Image: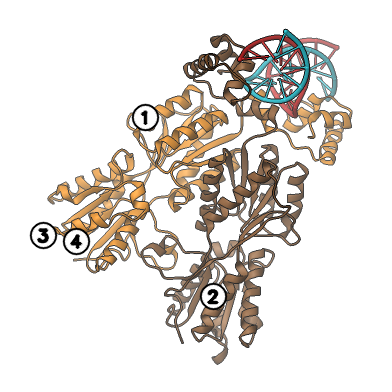
Chain colours: A orange, B brown, C red, D cyan
Amino acid sequence: MVTIYDIAKKANVSPMTVSRVINNSGNIRLTTRKKVEKAIKELGYVPNSAARSLTSNKTKTLGLILTDIANPFFSKIARGAEDAALDLGYRVLMSNTDEDSEKEINYIDMMISARVDGVLLAPTSDRTSSQIDRLRKHDIPVVLIDRTIEQFEGDYVVGDSYDGSRKLIEHLIMYGHQNIALINGPSNVSTARDRQRGYLETLKLNDLPIYEHYISEIDYKNVQIGNTKNIVQQLLQLEGTKRPTAIFAANNFIAISVIRALKELGLNVPKDISVVCFDEVEPVVYFDPFFTVAAQPASELGKIGVQFLVERVEHKNVEKERKIILPPDILIRKSTRKI
Amino acid sequence: MVTIYDIAKKANVSPMTVSRVINNSGNIRLTTRKKVEKAIKELGYVPNSAARSLTSNKTKTLGLILTDIANPFFSKIARGAEDAALDLGYRVLMSNTDEDSEKEINYIDMMISARVDGVLLAPTSDRTSSQIDRLRKHDIPVVLIDRTIEQFEGDYVVGDSYDGSRKLIEHLIMYGHQNIALINGPSNVSTARDRQRGYLETLKLNDLPIYEHYISEIDYKNVQIGNTKNIVQQLLQLEGTKRPTAIFAANNFIAISVIRALKELGLNVPKDISVVCFDEVEPVVYFDPFFTVAAQPASELGKIGVQFLVERVEHKNVEKERKIILPPDILIRKSTRKI
DNA sequence: ATGAAAGCGCTAACAA
DNA sequence: TTGTTAGCGCTTTCAT
């Protein structure tokens, strides 16, 4: 392996001088610099990050912990994050928790072991709180993304689940819907709570009745395997006027699963029932915009998250806590209709 | 920072003993091990990877260089790769080249600097060859994924672009199409070449004429911004019997762009014109399977790629070269019709 | 079964 | 402007 010592020997200088050239630190005579750069090029030297980290206590690496990078929403976040990291001179260590807190713990361990300079984290649930403490004990800054945690103190960058839900429900109400069901994610995730709150408050403000059996929860695993059918069936079995005319699916995957279930049950969207959801359904939208959605700026979330994180890492003078809540775009398309 | 020295002091043993416990190496008396493990837990010690790498010359990290993780095809590869890496005890450093060879060079540098144990690479073009040489000069094994490179010697895991194309074109011919256009990716990428070869040979075998103006190329940037409209327009302007009745779009993004262009030009798919493509168009397929596609096993590609890579990294006894070509699934759906 | 010494490649701190 | 020394946290090697 080529080291600074090899370069030093070849260029007839000390290793320290080589180090200075590489890092553009200190004053170097131009001729010396040229000599060193020539040697570096000739020997194809590339600095050893591990050695650097050991002395500098910096890895120039950020941890990115998402639930599933194969979900377009998260892959866009990842892309935005990676782009921002590159700009700022950082690398990204990627991981997928599958909403599994065991996996999450292991990845946190990995991040600590890797001594990443900071972690961008979409927590699996409020229980992640203790893992954040662990990171902080190791002096690793954390920025939350997409989801917050109750009583979390620190930076986060999320979409406005509450506001988006309000607007989606208001849209349905304007379209004449009075019986609106909610199929939500697990309530120990902040986005699910906020979406339910938006749903409930909008109904209340519009003097619409709230039926408990209109609200159901489904977890990640069950959405994955498309298990919304039972829920949908139960909703449709409600008698007469209580049968919902619209469904608010808490995210894109739930919506897709719901529409498939409806189809299997012989119902057409939007003719027989309207559907709205959070998150864009890509890439369909580019050729056949179908879903009425609250589209979150996923790539922005990642980008801003990394920017905030790096500011923390580099001890920039910023406020104690920065809470960014980006409004979603409400896009009225073909999955809803007036009744 | 907690080090093995802190643990050693606390447990009244030497640092070396701590190291042995952590790595399960050498013989340790059970009581000693317990003592050490207790100290580790109490102090919340996590090994420093940088220090480890420095002595062991291993980072337990793999580089993953894709073109764009926001593309569902690649995000599935990434997911498969990350899962496999986790299983095998490796971490993944992620990057996106955007098909840009400059960016690719920088990322290769990053991988060398990070001293990753191996790199899984979707090369931007055949010119990537020199970058692979660079990695190998640093003793970093490389496995190619999704695409090969002319005269590349080593492992690769790709989909069968040739076979998939043959079957897609045969399907069109069976449906009565005789005028089939190809909108391909850049010809310096192996998949594009193979798809064109499959296209041409199938036409030839079926005694169908080959028109040069049926074949066009579009690069990544232009697909991104949806610039297939010009191409589509030119195809449609062809007079009478020469006007294509079907389009073979070389990948999912091209297909989406094409369908949008067709729609803007007032044409319906499949009524007015049929469209086939490579790669699944997710997640539409789950509720409304529309595209007739050659679906590649993306997640498998990533998984096998990592398995092969790790075998190289760990010097397992395997053949000199392993060339895995996975057949795509041909899924006949609604974007094609008999004429 | 355990420990001591040396060194991985680099940079911070000090010296010249 | 350049060089010397020491040490980051760990493992390899050799000793006990």
Mark 1 chain: A
Tag of residue A239: 3
| Residue displayed at 52% across by 80% down | B172
Mark 3 or 1, which is nearer the eye? 3
| Residue displayed at 44% across by 41% down | A97
Callout 1 and callout 2 share a chain: no
Q: Residues within 10 Å of mark 3 (few under 14, many from 20)?
A: few
**Residue A320 seen in the figure:** no
Q: Is residue B14 above or below residue B261?
A: above
Residue assigned mark 4: A245
Mark closest to the chain's N terminus, 3 or 1? 1
Percent from the top left, x then y, of residue B315? Answer: 70, 42
Between the C-alphas of marks 3 and 1, the distance is 43 Å
The answer to which of A318 and A92 lies nearer the viewer is: A92
Q: Is residue A25 above or below residue B123?
A: above
Between the C-alphas of marks 4 and 1, the distance is 38 Å
Q: Residues within 10 Å of mark 4 (few under 14, many from 20)?
A: many
Between the C-alphas of marks 1 and 2, the distance is 53 Å
The answer to which of A24 and B250 lies nearer the viewer is: B250
Callout 4 and callout 3 share a chain: yes
Mark 4 chain: A
| Residue displayed at 44% across by 81% down | B337
Residue assigned mark 1: A152
Q: Residues within 10 Å of mark 2 (few under 14, many from 20)?
A: many
Q: Is residue A161 above or below residue A135?
A: below
Mark closest to the chain's N terminus, 4 or 1? 1
Q: Amino acid at mark 3?
A: Glu
Point out the image quarter for the N terminus of chain B: top right
Q: Amino acid at mark 2?
A: Leu
Percent from the top left, x then y, of residue B193? Answer: 67, 69
In the rendered structure, the answer to whether residue B63 lies left or right of residue A287 reads right
